[in-house]
Image (tube, coloured by chain):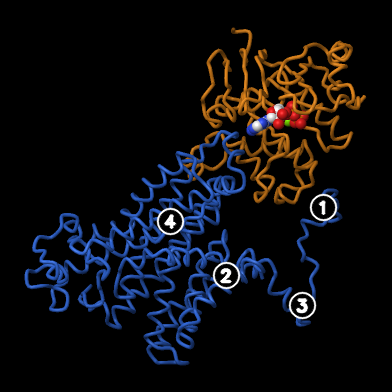
Chain colours: A orange, B blue
């Protein structure tokens, strides 16, 4: 058990009898980078929902560092070190870029601390560095709602980096980004792995190849196979699942 | 110019504090003691509007029950005044407030006892509403009730309080309410011009403090969290924040402000009654905020004063017309000025209007620079 940081043990999720996940088992080692692919509706987002406390598993257990987190609130799980980027980039549109980042970077998240404590220079510097790195520094004082889609993606990812959870879960981080931005995101993610445990969900195969991480293929709520991208792509079952879908190669 | 804009509200406040009473005293420009007293009431309503701005404008929770807290503040000060005043208008034969005689009550109800004390009563004005708001808020927010359900529950609570106060003749004089105009305070009769001027001044002295309190709450990361709750609450949870205490705190502060509002309004209108807990009054409070501009703090103050002043003017001219005018005003603002009068003003609406009539040069800053793609790439390369 001490080898893994996160485990899903025979997890099923049913929405009124429809199984979005079926008997799924999955483990992550600390510092690991893992990619998850699968056709639309495979259950990828539901997989993150079940880890982050949005959805309660109908059956099975989710354990973080050996302790079950089933039934904990979203904020408790987050405070235990699990951070998430949503499929559509979710930022607070009426706050500035900088304030979006400073809020998630706040080490102390209770109301009285937020009222009385000023953010330390260390955290402020950190926020500034992140903005510089992703090229959002010139937009620091802009309302997040006025950013372009790509910039919102970057901001959403940056907010996770600022929050710095042990486990970073990214749902489609490069959707809508240019090729250049995509490869920059890949670099950022690779630099995060090691210190953080990172899970990346994507449809973009080029990007997945760039990451060079082990791939888990989900299909109809089940784990189809696991392996490096080239092995996985040679698997006849995977080819069959993706048949009819355009190969993004 | 920017500084001047920010100073305008303060200049108006200083004007209201120093000049209006002189105008009333000298009957300048048709301004009278009667008008001054009305303005005192409008300003006292600004407190409850500020609270609604916190809970609704910033946090996105539309409370239709602020009348509860408003009335509790009003009853607190009225009970004190009725107890400590000893004159023929107010005091009955048995030494208790006179209305008790009508119902044959000769033993003061126990919950009146603390209101003998001036300090306790002053504290009760905001502490009692805070406690009620804290309890109601905790139950509602812990169960993740929000949106329309929150509005409905607050309105239902309002109706419970309304019917309770209406029915309790022997405790609080039921429908008739408690009359403060014949009571005495600081050696003055509460209804006299001198006392009214004093209440007016107290109201205007307290108002900036209420404003600064709200400013303090909304300007830092606490305020950002409120906006975060309003714009995307689940996102805030996934970032490790528990929204419940934030909402409870804001609801308590809004309740406390409503209590102060109710107390100031009561002494200046001369009576507190269950009418303050009517459904329509709490909805009107929301209208003031919408008209003034929610999420702006200055807006709600402006809205409370302007709408109520308008109400007086319209009612004096055409007594039956106000409800229609109010409805029309609300629709007009919601449709054409989503940020209210103040938001419209600060976002250049006034200039744009002048420009439309050819009275000012069109400026390049409107419509919003932020939305302009070319401006974006320009500032990116800068
Ligand atoms: N709250 C819900 N209620 C009912 N059905 C749901 C719910 N959430 C997801 N589903 C269903 O569960 C299945 C898996 O959805 P999920 O969003 O996890 O897929 P996905 O792999 O993320 O797909 P995509 O690549 O399109 O994002 C889908 O068929 C979806 O319709
Ligand atoms: Mg998905």
Q: Earlier in the sequence, mark 3 or mark 1?
A: 3
Foreground residue, B231 or B376? Answer: B231
Q: Residue shown at 86%/24% (left/top)? A: A205
Tell me the SS state at disc 4: helix
Number of residues whose C-alpha sits closer than 10 Å to that of mark 3, classed few (under 14), some (14–19) or many (20 or more): some
Does the Cβ of the disc 3 residue fall within 8 Å of ligand 1? no
Foreground residue, B273 or A103? Answer: B273
Say which mark, if any, is on residue B355. Answer: 3
CA gap between label 3 and label 4 equals: 43 Å
In the rendered image, which residue does mark 1 sit on? B376
Say which mark, if any, is on residue B330. Answer: 2
Q: Are marks 3 and 4 on the same chain?
A: yes
CA gap between label 2 and label 1 equals: 36 Å
Q: Are marks 2 and 1 on the same chain?
A: yes
Tell me the SS state at disc 3: helix
* Chain where mark 2 sits: B
Does residue B116 appear to the left or right of A55 in the view shown? Answer: left
Q: Position of residue B269 (x, y in %)?
A: 33, 75
* Chain where mark 3 sits: B
CA gap between label 3 and label 2 equals: 25 Å
Q: Residue shown at 75%/24% (left/top)? A: A42
Q: Earlier in the sequence, mark 1 or mark 4?
A: 4
**Marks 1,4: beta carbons within 8 A:** no
| Mark in the foreground, 4 or 2 | 4
Q: Earlier in the sequence, mark 3 or mark 2?
A: 2
Using the image, determine if residue B372 lies above or below residue B182.
Answer: above
| Mark in the foreground, 2 or 1 | 2
**Marks 3,2: beta carbons within 8 A:** no
Using the image, determine if residue A218 lies above or below residue B250.
Answer: above
């Amino acid at each position: 058990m001490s080898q893994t940081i996160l485990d899903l043990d025979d997890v099923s999720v049913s929405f009124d009898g429809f199984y979005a996940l079926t008997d799924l088992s999955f483990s992550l080692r600390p510092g690991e980078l893992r990619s998850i692919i699968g056709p639309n509706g495979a259950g990828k987002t539901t997989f993150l929902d079940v880890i982050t406390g949005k959805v309660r598993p109908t059956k099975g257990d989710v354990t973080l560092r050996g302790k079950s987190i089933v039934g904990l609130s979203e904020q408790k799980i987050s405070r235990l070190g699990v951070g998430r980027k949503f499929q559509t980039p979710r930022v607070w549109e009426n706050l500035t870029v900088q304030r979006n980042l400073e809020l998630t970077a706040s080490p102390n998240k209770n109301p009285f601390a937020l009222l009385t404590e000023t953010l330390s220079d260390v955290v402020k510097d950190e926020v500034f560095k992140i903005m510089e790195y992703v090229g959002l520094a010139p937009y620091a004082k802009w309302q997040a709602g006025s950013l372009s889609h790509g910039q919102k993606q970057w901001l959403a990812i940056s907010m996770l980096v600022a929050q710095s959870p042990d486990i970073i879960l990214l749902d489609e981080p490069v959707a809508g980004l240019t090729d250049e931005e995509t490869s920059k995101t890949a670099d950022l993610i690779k630099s995060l792995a090691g210190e953080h445990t990172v899970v990346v969900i994507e449809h973009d195969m080029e990007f997945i190849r760039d990451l060079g991480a082990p791939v888990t293929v989900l299909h109809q709520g089940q784990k189809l196979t696991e392996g490096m991208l080239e092995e996985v792509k040679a698997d006849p079952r995977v080819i069959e699942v993706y048949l009819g879908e355009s190969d993004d190669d | 110019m920017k500084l001047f804009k920010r100073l305008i509200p303060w200049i108006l406040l200083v004007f209201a504090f120093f000049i209006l009473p002189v105008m009333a005293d000298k009957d300048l420009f048709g301004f009278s003691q009667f008008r001054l007293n009305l303005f005192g009431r409008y300003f006292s309503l600004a407190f409850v509007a500020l609270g609604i701005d916190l809970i609704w404008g910033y946090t996105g929770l539309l409370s239709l029950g602020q009348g509860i807290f408003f009335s509790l503040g009003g009853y607190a000060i009225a009970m004190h005044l009725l107890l400590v005043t000893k004159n023929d208008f107010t005091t009955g034969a048995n030494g208790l407030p006179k209305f008790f005689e009508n119902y044959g009550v000769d033993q003061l109800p126990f919950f009146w006892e603390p209101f003998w004390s001036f300090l306790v009563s002053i504290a009760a004005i905001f502490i009692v509403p805070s406690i009620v708001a804290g309890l109601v808020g905790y139950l509602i927010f812990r169960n993740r009730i929000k949106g329309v359900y929150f509005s409905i529950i607050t309105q239902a609570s309002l109706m419970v309080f309304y019917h309770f106060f209406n029915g309790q003749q022997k405790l609080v004089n039921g429908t008739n309410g408690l009359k403060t105009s014949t009571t005495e305070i600081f050696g003055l009769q509460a209804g006299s011009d001198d006392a009214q001027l004093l209440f007016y001044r107290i109201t205007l002295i307290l108002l900036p403090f209420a404003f600064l309190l709200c400013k303090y709450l909304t300007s830092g990361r606490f305020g950002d969290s409120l906006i975060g709750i309003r714009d995307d609450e689940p996102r805030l949870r996934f970032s490790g924040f528990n929204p419940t205490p934030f909402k409870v705190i804001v609801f308590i502060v809004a309740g406390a402000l409503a209590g102060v509002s109710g107390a100031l309004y009561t002494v200046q209108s001369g009576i507190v009654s269950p009418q303050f807990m009517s459904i329509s009054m709490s909805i009107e409070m929301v209208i003031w905020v919408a008209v003034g501009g929610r999420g702006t703090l200055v807006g709600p103050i402006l809205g409370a004063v302007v709408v109520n002043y308008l109400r007086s003017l319209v009612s004096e001219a055409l007594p039956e017309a106000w409800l229609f005018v109010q409805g029309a005003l609300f629709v007009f603002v919601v449709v054409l000025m989503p940020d209210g009068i103040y938001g419209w003003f600060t976002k250049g609406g006034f200039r744009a209007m002048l420009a439309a009539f050819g009275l000012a040069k069109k400026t390049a800053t409107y419509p919003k620079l932020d939305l302009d793609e070319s401006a974006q790439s320009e500032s990116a390369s800068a």
